[in-house]
């Protein structure tokens, strides 16, 4: 699992925040699988990481897609409210964190760096 944090965020990231982010990531992945399996755009999406922020009231979910990232981002933005509603039903917490989907381009950046190194 990819964790997208920098050194400053590591000091602020609590073990509880990590647990909640991981739990939200798992539950949202299950929701996408269960409710949106037939969606042509979303069936190519994989959640690859999560960060909790703002006193655990906000979780950023990182995704990768084998399709068009712009189309995937637009579709995920459309269903965010419905996914959060379903998340509230599955999450055993008093409050349900806000969620935001962000594209993770780590694989593409690694491929570009590898291509540059091969060119040397």
Image: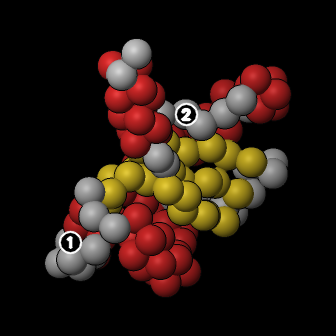
Q: Is residue 11 above or below residue 51?
A: above
Residue at 44% x, 71% y is 70
User: Where 87 sits versus 62, above or below?
Assistant: below
- The residue that label 1 is drawn on is 37
**Residue 18 left/right relative to 47:** right
Alpha carbon of mark 1 to alpha carbon of mark 2: how far? 25 Å
Is residue 30 visible in the rendered image? The answer is no
Residue at image coords 52%, 77%: 77
Farthest top residue? 120
Q: What's the mark number on residue 3? A: 2
Taking the image as shown, residue 109 lies to the left or right of residue 88, namely: left
Q: How is the image coloured?
A: secondary structure
Residue at point 74%, 48% (across, down)? 53
Q: Quadrant of the C terminus?
A: top left
> Closer to the N terminus: mark 1 or mark 2?
2
Horizontal and vertical percent position of residue 33: 26, 64
Q: Quadrant of the N terminus?
A: top left
User: Which element type, helix, strand or loop, lies under badge 2?
Assistant: loop
**Of helix, strand and loop, which one carries label 1?**
loop
Q: Nearer the viewer, residue 11 or 64?
A: 64
Residue 42 visible within the image? yes
Image position, residue 108 (x, y; %): 40, 42
């Amino acid at each position: 699992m990819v964790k997208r944090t920098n050194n400053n965020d590591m000091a602020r990231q609590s073990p509880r925040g990590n647990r909640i982010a991981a739990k939200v990531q798992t539950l949202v992945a299950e929701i996408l699988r269960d409710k949106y399996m037939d969606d042509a755009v979303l069936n190519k999406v994989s959640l690859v990481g999560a960060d909790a922020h703002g006193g655990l009231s906000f979780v950023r979910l990182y995704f990768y897609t084998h399709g068009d990232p712009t189309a995937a981002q637009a579709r995920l933005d459309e269903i965010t409210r419905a996914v959060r509603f379903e998340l509230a039903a599955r999450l055993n917490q008093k409050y349900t964190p806000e969620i935001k989907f962000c594209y993770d381009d780590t694989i593409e950046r690694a491929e570009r760096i590898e291509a540059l190194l091969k060119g040397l």
